[in-house]
Image (cartoon, rainbow, N blue to C red):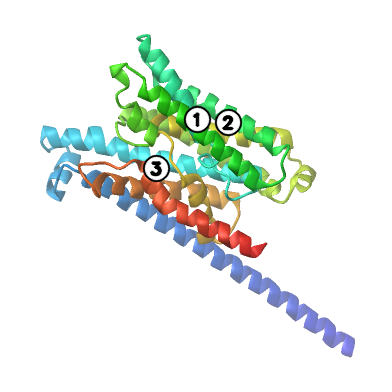
Amino acid sequence: MNADKIEEKTTIEKKSDKIKKKSDNKTSSLIILAWYFILIILLILLFGLNIYMGSAKINIHDLISVLVGKGSTLQSKIIWNIRIPRAFAAMLLGGALSISGYLLQTFFSNPIAGPFVLGISHAAKLSVALVMILMLNHGVVVNSWMLITAAFLGAMLAIGFILAVSGKVNRMSILVICGVMIGYICSAITDFVVTFADDSNIVNLHNWSLGSFSGMTMDNVKIILIVVAIGLFISVFLSKPISAYQLGESQAKSLGVNIKLFRAALVILSGILSATVTAFAGPISFVGIAVPHIIRNLFKTSKPGVIIPGCFLGGGVFCLFCDLIARTVFAPTELSISSVTSIFGAPVVIAMMIKRQRNI
């Protein structure tokens, strides 16, 4: 009799656990959907504010007139040729940088890994600056694909150095220090090159080297869209291998993941995305570290299939917000985008490191 009661109690507890798990899963799904909805709304709102606000004052009525093709020629040029391409670029490049950071964090199994901190963005910046100066001094027109290729090669060199160092040290702090040193060296060389460049065609190179979404065109946006869309698709496609890899290399191997191929794919994909950002907007700090951390905390999950699209939306929101501040707070003077992203991103990274230290 007692055995029957114990068995009945065990059955009831199992059913209760199943109901609780279903309830928790449902709650988790609702939280994720809610945050997706909020991020999309914020993205639309900030995109609208970015094309509405600026040093040139345009009221709502005039803005609507321009959007339906009835505004003045000057206002149409400001909206269609300057603000809309810039807003699209900030959204796409912010998303790309966030995904790039997430992929590097997965690769190194550490949340403070990112293209800016590890010196990857600075190496890409140096290679782009050298290519621009070399080509323009010889009268060769530099196209967007050349810039992306140059930035990618610079990024790969930095990643190669980081990987070489990571094989000899076990502490992530040493790796980060090496990355910071790479960043300082590359920035110093870039500043030297820019300072002594004589060609009038590269007068905006200094502003670009500080990080900026200014000067974007719809042709630039089309190229950015192609690269970022492919990068986003491949990142989502890699969600299952990433989930397995997060459990450990041995576990991933047992689940059929080709570790060497997978790690190479992470590095190359992250390099392409961060190179695209650097080629068009220069180095942008802390987005690749802060946004993935924020998204993981908001969504309360580590599932890559959920986090990767969230990182893209979060990166777009973050960069649209920061670019709006960069353009409007001291208008007509414009701040570099890295200055603003550092203000909002650095505290997130500091808080994350303090939390990690407490958990050790």
Q: Which residue shows up at 12% across the image and 32% down it?
A: 73
The first of marks 2 and 3 along the sequence is 2
Label 1 and label 3: CA atoms lie apart by 16 Å
Q: Position of residue 179 (x, y in %)?
A: 57, 38
Q: Visible in this render: residue 295?
A: no
Left or right: 360 as drawn, with respect to 9: left
The mark that comes first in sequence, 2 or 1, is 2
Residue 136 appears anywhere in the view:
yes
Q: Are marks 2 and 1 in contact (CB under 8 Å)?
A: yes
As drawn, the residue found furthest toward the bottom would be: 1
Q: Which residue is mark 2?
A: 158
Is 276 above or below relative to 345? Answer: above
Q: Which mark is residue 338?
A: 3
**Where is residue 74 drawn, in percent x and y?**
13, 33
- Where, by quadrant of the figure, is residue 76 drawn? top left
The front one of 257 and 174 is 174
Q: Which mark is residue 186?
A: 1
